[in-house]
Amino acid sequence: MEKSFCIILPCFNESGVIAQLLRDIEAKTVQSSYAFRIILVDDGSTDDTVAIAKAFQFQSPLYELQIIQLRHNSGHQEAIRHGLHYAHSLQTNAAGYIVMDSDGEDDPAAILNFIQGAGTSDIMLVNRGSRQESFRFKVGYFFYRIIFQIITGRNISHGNFSMISDRVLAKIVHQPFIHYGSFLTKQKMGISYFTFDRAARIDNNPKMNFQSLVFHGLYSMIEYSEEILYSLMKLFVLFIFALFGVACYVIYSKYIAFTAISGWTSGVAGSLFISLLVIVSTVILGLILLSIKKIMLQTSKNYDEV
């Protein structure tokens, strides 16, 4: 059977870039001589994205374009999930399933690296090299990576641009996620990385602003909610011991050593108690959110092939 690859392109209102991106994908991968099935996942676009994509024609017969439309705008990550679900339903047993953004910032030239590494690991992630962004964005991204490493204990320098094997697809296709790149790093599968520079958006009009970066970072950390909750619970135990120590010190100072300073111990104990309440509330909220996360999986089909 001829080796083939599947490319999943989530998109929303990309009428100005989609045709150029499809041309770039073909131009930069045609030398590989492999077949490519490209699944365009339209996330409820209100422009001519779908019409332009339907009219597009590849030069090589090795490229096939399939388009699915979500029945309502569901967001970038849901578009990825539905694209994976659709790819799995085709049962193509592709050599790799590549997820990339449809604005051109994920350089199609990196697909050759995926092809070269196919079969060496179940998950391949692209670490971002240099990127053409504003200084404010770069500073925000720098601190986001630091905060992510402190909270989760892991380094993150990649986005959604990745390739997974058929085995991984079968495992994750029915699992919920809200940040695909972070979600993949939690899979107990072989993971490899390579670095590739980010390209400029084809129409030079980036959609990711500072606010988007903030929410993007929060979503990536929510994928590690169990680990974060466990850290909070350990902090909770430390505060319990701290409160016990303060209580012992207060008793000793007041009734044995007679050296208690009026108001000091009660102030310290009060601060620790308030901190304890905050942590307890956070742990309870975390448990509630985890419960919601466990039941938020959507099993119903929410797209149509066009």
Image (spheres, grey):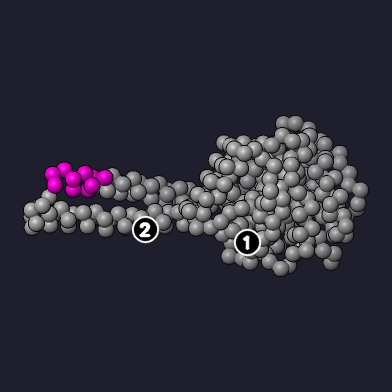
Left or right: 111 in relation to 242? right
Left or right: 106 in relation to 20? left
First in sequence: mark 2 vs mark 1: 1
Q: Which residue is mark 2?
A: 234
Q: Is residue 94 visible?
A: no
Q: Nearer the viewer, mark 2 or mark 1?
A: 2
Mark 2 closeness class: few <14, some 14–19, many ≥20 residues within 10 Å: few
Disc 1 element: helix
Label of residue 171 in the image: 1
Magenta span: 261-271
Give, as a three-letter code, the residue at label 1: Lys
Residue lying at 21% horizontally and 44% vertically, measured from the top left? 267
Foreground pick, 69 / 120: 120
- The percent position of residue 261, horizontal first and vertical second, equals 14, 47
Give, as a three-letter code, the residue at label 2: Lys
* Magenta span contains residue 266: yes
- Contact, mark 2 vs mark 1 (Cβ under 8 Å): no
Left or right: 98 in relation to 151? right
Looking at the figure, which quarter contains the N terminus? bottom right
Residue lying at 80% horizontally and 43% vertically, measured from the top left? 21
Q: Main structural element of the magenta stretch: helix, strand or loop? A: helix
Label of residue 155 in the image: none
Foreground pick, 15 / 300: 15
Inter-mark Cα distance, 2 to 1: 31 Å
Mark 1 closeness class: few <14, some 14–19, many ≥20 residues within 10 Å: few
Q: Is residue 51 visible?
A: yes
Foreground pick, 194 / 74: 194
